[in-house]
Amino acid sequence: MEEFIEGGLESIRNFLDRQNREIKEMTVAMSLAYWNATISGKEEDYKDYEKKTLKIKKYFSNKESFEKVRDFLKKSNNHLEKRQLEILYREYLSCQGDFKLIEEITKKSSEIEYKFNTFRANVDGQNLTDNEIKEILKKNTNSENLKRAWEASKEQGRLVEKELVELIKLRNKLAKSLGFDNYYVMSLELSEQKEGEIERIFIDLEESTKKSFKIVKDGIDKFLSEKYKINKEELKPWHYQDLFFQEAPEIYDINLDKFYNKDVLKIAEKFYNNLGFDIKDIVERSDWYEKPGKYQHAYCINADRKGDIRVIENIKNNEKWMDTTLHELGHAIYEKHCDESLPFLLRENVHTFVTEAIALLFGRNSKNILFIRGYCDIKDEETERIKEKIKKQLRLDELVFLKWSQVMFYFERELYKNPEQDLNKLWWDLVKKYQMINFQRDSSDWASKIHFVSAPVYYHNYLLGKILASQLNHKIVKEIVKGKDFLNPNHSISEMGDFLKKELFFHGKKWRWDKLIKKALKEELNPKYFIEDFCG
């Protein structure tokens, strides 16, 4: 099968070889530039990342190459070739609009992200990190102190709101020029997802959890009102011990942080080693602790899709960072065990929400009594005292995050449908509906969530990941480890790791996500396991 191109004949195979080679070179350069920028916080490093991002977008804006991909898609009968062409089709389609518009979107996104990543909340004249703000919200009992810390963090929303709304409009303009209703719809379709299917899952989960969430929310409010010595009706967003109430406060008389007052990174290394995953190279290549100007959250990056896998974190030895470290290293082991013989275009995780499922599956262990008993050396009597409380806390966490995900899903969808509406009111209306926090203020608090900039139309994947994590856990416990205590550090349990490597990680993007899940689990994505685990 051949095509006449620029005075010569180019086969599908030769075209794909060239695409893989050229895209790899640009992608590696862009990935390393992003890493450098998020480590240093320097404006010139963000500019370098922006430049390298634009280079690859310019490459995908080539209309002749796009037409060639479309033509080859009609002709190819080889599965691996066709899969690469499908991926290329979506990449090229996303960049087929006016390149000046694409350039403007990229520059504005980079500028806003730089502001986010270098922002430090100013409380009483002192610049505080996210870790320090979260510590205040978790431990301080003075309502005025909590309010000042919470409002100081939300200032980053006010700082970027105008530019962020402009960015949303520019993204929509590009999407409409490519034949989509808006950028939200375009993003879902280009990631092989459908809005209606996702919404049905969200509706089902909402219906399944209305009663149970109301009960636990009443328990949270009772606990917090007693803690802060105020009436339930006086509770405000800053009383919920998290900037967005996406994590649940600890209400069951347990202090999980005390169990992790040790080197959480070493705990994570030992855990993954016991499952048959050697992560020493990843640990050495990564950047784990706070620095001035550094990105304050966490991510995993597969820089070259052939072993250069890195994690960025800001570790403190507490339960949150135990969860985060297990989570990010979950992403890392997925990337590490992809079949390196695959072409570059296929050599990464099958879908965002599938790698999130792996990360969430492992991250949950920070609130698993078997993990705590095995890796934190607690006594048997302490284990008995807290095991039911920890189980309740994990269930509470999952319910709280589910409701928070509803806010993000519906807000972002409506944001792209109409960025001119009163977004501040929309935000707090959704918070009231789903999180049951009755609060309003005319301030751009929604814009303080970094995902709207750096990971647009992404958040639903966390909830889909949680669903798949429960489904995987059911399969592993019932059929793979068959009752063995894979959380016991004195046991080397490789069956779980072998299953994940063989059935999920190894295949990369060779198959669509739905086909790979069906192959690995012998059933389609199904929320019933998540509902059984946490929503009863």
Image (tube, helix red, strand yellow):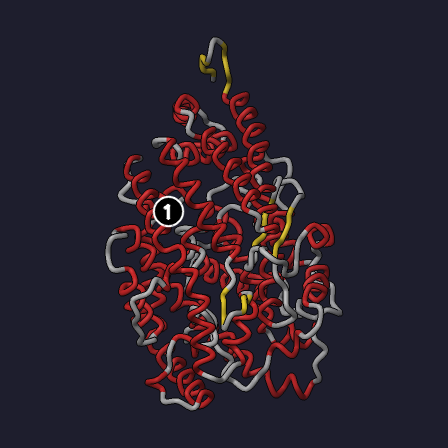
**Residue 46, image x, y percentages:** 53, 44
Q: On the image, numbered disc 1 is attached to which residue?
A: 188
Q: Quadrant of residue 182?
A: top left
Against 170, is 263 above or below?
below
Image quarter where the C terminus lies is bottom left
At 33% from the left and 42% from the top, the residue drawn is 170
**Residue 352, image x, y percentages:** 49, 50
Against 424, is 76 above or below?
above
Q: Quadrant of residue 156?
A: bottom left
Residue occupying the far front of the picture: 125
**Residue 192, image x, y percentages:** 40, 44
**What type is the residue that disc 1 sits on?**
Leu
> Around disc 1, counting alpha carbons within 10 Å, would you say few (fewer than 14), some (14 to 19), or many (20 or more)?
some
Q: Who is closer to the viewer here, 286 or 326?
A: 286
Q: Who is closer to the viewer here, 336 or 180?
A: 180
Task: Tell me the element at label 1.
Answer: helix
At 44% from the left and 41% from the top, the residue drawn is 107
Task: Describe residue 413's horizontal placement relative to residue 528 as left or right.
Answer: left
Task: Describe residue 480's horizontal placement relative to residue 531 as left or right.
Answer: right
Against 258, is 157 above or below?
above
At 32% from the left and 40% from the top, the residue drawn is 175
Task: Describe residue 71's horizontal placement relative to residue 21 as left or right.
Answer: left
Residue occupying the far top of the picture: 7
Camera sees residue 34: yes
Camera sees residue 533: no
Residue occupying the far right of the picture: 490
At 50% from the left and 76% from the top, the residue drawn is 137
**Residue 464, image x, y percentages:** 44, 58
